[in-house]
Image (tube, helix red, strand yellow):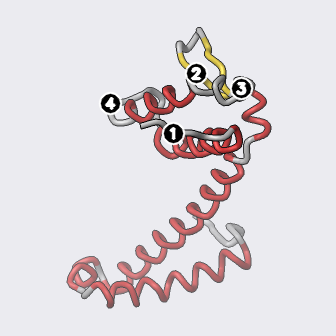
Amino acid sequence: MKLNLTKAEYKRLLDVLEIADWIIASREAKETPRTAPYKKLQQKLFTLAKEHECEDLVEYEEQFRSYIYTDKFDNESPSMEFIQKYNNDTFWDELIDRLARRDFILEVGQEKFEKLEPIERYKGISRYEDKYDKEFRENGLSGIRI
């Protein structure tokens, strides 16, 4: 299969690859068998940079024996804006969800919680989610103390 991309589309593809790589491998110090196929595909797509007149965005780095993004890509790509928004939204969603779940379990007990129908769990957790959502929207983390 041959995929024909314009220069603009290839640039967007580089952005998408950066976002995907951040999600897949940003917390991994080294490549793993699980992440290797994605890195291999990314490298294959990077080899097309010159063909798409984007060699100023991707370059081969002998030290790493792989293609990497250039400083120009890092400075101009909107990918980090998407990543930062995703990280911020995920942080608040996870914090609210985990605190709400914890508090509802403390209210009813672990054993009873596990026996509840899913809809009843959802209703109980939702009460706490609403409370935390309101608190964090109004005060951020300023009310959190350990």
Q: Earlier in the sequence, mark 4 or mark 1?
A: 1
Q: CA distance from mark 4 to mark 2?
A: 19 Å
* Disc marking residue 33: 4
For mark 4, give the secondary structure: loop
For mark 2, give the secondary structure: strand
For mark 1, give the secondary structure: loop
Q: Amino acid at mark 3?
A: Thr
Residue under circle 1?
A: 3
Of the two numbered discs 4 and 1 in the rendering, the one whose residue sits closer to the viewer: 1
- Taking the spot 53% from the left edge, 31% from the top edge, the residue there is 45
Q: CA distance from mark 1 to mark 3?
A: 24 Å
- Give the x, y percent position of residue 112: 24, 84
Residue under circle 2?
A: 67
Q: Amino acid at mark 1?
A: Leu
Q: Amino acid at mark 2?
A: Tyr
Q: Earlier in the sequence, mark 3 or mark 4?
A: 4
Of the two numbered discs 1 and 3 in the rendering, the one whose residue sits closer to the viewer: 1
Residue under circle 3?
A: 70
Of the two numbered discs 3 and 4 in the rendering, the one whose residue sits closer to the viewer: 3
Q: CA distance from mark 4 to mark 1?
A: 27 Å
Cβ atoms under marks 3 and 4 closer than 8 Å: no
- Give the x, y percent position of residue 118: 29, 84
- Give the x, y percent position of residue 126: 46, 85
Of the two numbered discs 2 and 1 in the rendering, the one whose residue sits closer to the viewer: 1
- Taking the spot 53% from the left edge, 72% from the top edge, the residue there is 96
Q: Earlier in the sequence, mark 4 or mark 2?
A: 4
